[in-house]
Amino acid sequence: MKKKKIAIQVTGVKKIYKLYDKPSDRLKEALGLTKKKKYKEHHALDGVDLTVYEGEMVGIIGTNGSGKSTILKIITGVLNPSSGRVRVNGRISALLELGAGFHMEYNGIENIYLNGTMIGFSKEEIDRKLSSILEFADIGDYVYQPVKTYSSGMFVRLAFAVAINIEPEILIVDEALAVGDVFFQAKCYHKFEEFKKMGKTILFVSHDLSSISKYCDRVVLLNQGVKLGEGSAREMIDIYKRVLVGQYTAGGDEAGNFLEEGESQGGAAVNPELLEYGTKAAQITEYYITDEAGIRTTAIIKGQQFTIHLKVEFSEDVPAPIFAFTVKNVKGTEITGTNTMVEKAFLKSVQAGERKEVTFSQRMSLQGGEYLLSFGVTGYERDTFQVYHRLYDVVNLTVISDKDTVGYYDMNTTITVVDGNEVG
């Protein structure tokens, strides 16, 4: 049996960042003005091992902050590890965060030559590849405009076209395809299949579990800088879903030790830069999300029931408070939301000293991805609109999905296909 050739070998890699409370602490340490430790250590990666063989497509999944992008940057040489070793056999082409390797003032053509030169191609070699790059990108005359004028979709089209046409032996892609339209994504995944047939290696990070499941030979699961496991897509996705809903015990054995139903690993992650204002006649004192098992979490599996909880205290009489929540995408677009007035769920007056607990229960139909939750208590006093308390973008909500349709939400369509040749 022919021995598999290793394309990427990561051994015991750690990446530690020093977090300082204030810039002056960093300066004092750099100048040797203090012997006291002025920083906290954040382990973005903590002793990660990873082997990728030639011709494999390996997926990396994990929550935000798990270390996915960090390990890709270390493999591609963008970052240096704090300790550990990385060995790469083959020419790498990487599509990391949007804009990496592009000069915003240059036009598309100039950036193609810039990227090709950085990788080591001559002008003559890039000349021969140019038509293939432009054909795949398919952005028309925009290629002659500065890339700072591009939409995110045009940007990723050009970046991916460059990445796949420079004849890489190893292709690394980090979430970038998520901003492309569905037709371009299909085109890219078709290219992945071509690459695999050619014996090329692909390392792929994505929140799109349906693509991870369909295309990856093997999947690695990271969580808080630690590799929880690796194996088949189905096995790792199952553990990932448990991590997301707080039912996986960090530090469990390889088989996975899970919490009993009803146990919680903590409440919502709060945005430290939240916008908050209002008269405070009513104040939101607590807020959190629970899944259909009643477990507090900030990650909900698409199709499952979930509940948003608000606890509100009143310091003044309020004639008819309105309790509300709004969901936005990470670009700030309001996707959905509702309130007790619209739903005709609560139309009573409240007296000073009272407390109310409000729950909004619904089924998750949003596409997989990251969202932001905002809450509010408002009302009308003699036809004047009053804001008692608003919390904007206060909680990050992750929707995990293994089937995403087009747009913001899933209409849960039922499809039937019958034989049109039958005589009815």
Image (cartoon, rainbow, N blue to C red):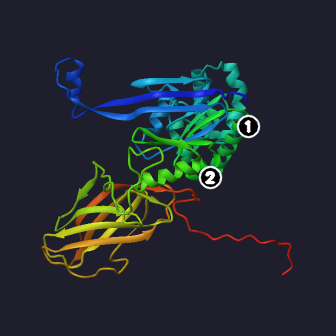
Specify the amino acid type for callout 1.
Lys
Q: Assign a secondary structure to mark 2.
A: helix
**191 or 160, nearer to the observer:** 191
Q: Position of residue 406 (x, y in %)?
A: 58, 59
Read off the residue under disc 2.
182
**387 or 105, nearer to the observer:** 387
Up-down: is 207 above or below 167? below
Viewer can see residue 100: yes
Up-down: is 188 above or below 88? below
Viewer can see residue 175: no
Q: Quick check: 225 left or right of 220?
A: left
Q: Position of residue 201 (x, y in %)?
A: 64, 33
- Residue in view at x 52 percent, y 63 percent: 409
Residue count near mark 2 (Cα–Cα under 10 Å), binned few <14, some 14–19, many ≥20: some
Q: Quick check: 239 left or right of 391?
A: right
Specify the amino acid type for callout 2.
Val
- Residue in view at x 62 percent, y 24 percent: 91
Quadrant of the frame with the C terminus: bottom right
Read off the residue under disc 1.
197
